[in-house]
Image (tube, coloured by chain):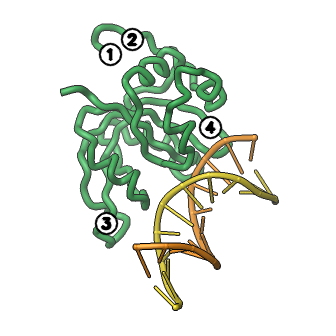
Chain colours: A green, B yellow, C orange
Amino acid sequence: MSKHYWLFKSEKSTWSWEDQVAKGDAGEEWDGVRNYQARNFMREMKVGDRGFFYLSQRDREIVGIVEIIAEAHPDSTTEDQRWECVNIKAIQSLPTPVSLDQIKTDPRLSDMVLVKNSRLSVQPVKEDEWRILCEMGGIVSGPRQ
DNA sequence: GCCAACGTTGGC
DNA sequence: GCCAACGTTGGC
């Protein structure tokens, strides 16, 4: 049973990293997703999985790490039964945010969904990509990471 | 602010 | 079930 990694995309003006951090361990719904692919990925998420928090638009960088704290359930922001969301909480900020430019120029990351399908707002991250990005972000990975 | 890429909708 | 038209996203 291997752990899975993800990436959540947000616009700072809609939901910033500071907003996420302010929710603390209680976390918050990752609502508002209206895309089947993104929803399907959220359905695969398990409590304890981790993800990156990425800012699109002007910022274009990974700024933090989050953890799934509740699995897929109906999105409270719509009556439409098709849409679901998970809950996530902030774990830590990256000491050094990793920019989209850095990601695009690193050949090891050229297969990332972020590079190949920039519009997908919730996406999977491979384990090796996760490790590389954590390293780039200044997180020293230890045995308990 | 523009525009390419993508996803969704709706007419046929 | 196809595809044109439309809307949205997000990089530049």
**Viewer-nearest of discs 1 and 3:** 3
> Height in image: C12 above or below A30?
above
Q: Are marks 1 and 2 on the same chain?
A: yes
Instruction: From the image, tell me which residue sits under label 4.
Output: A60
Q: Quadrant of the C terminus of chain A?
A: top left
Near mark 2 (Cα within 10 A), the count class, few <14, some 14-19 or many ≥20, is few
Q: Does label 4 or label 1 sit earlier along the sequence?
A: 4
Instruction: From the image, tell me which residue sits under label 1.
Output: A145
Marks 1 and 3, Cα distance to the nearest angstrom?
35 Å
A41 sits to left or right of B11: left
The picture quadrant where one finds residue C7 is: bottom right
Instruction: From the image, tell me which residue sits under label 2.
Output: A141
Residue found 54% across the figure and 17% down from its top: A136
The picture quadrant where one finds residue A90 is: top left
Q: Amino acid at mark 3?
A: Arg
Marks 4 and 3, Cα distance to the nearest angstrom?
29 Å
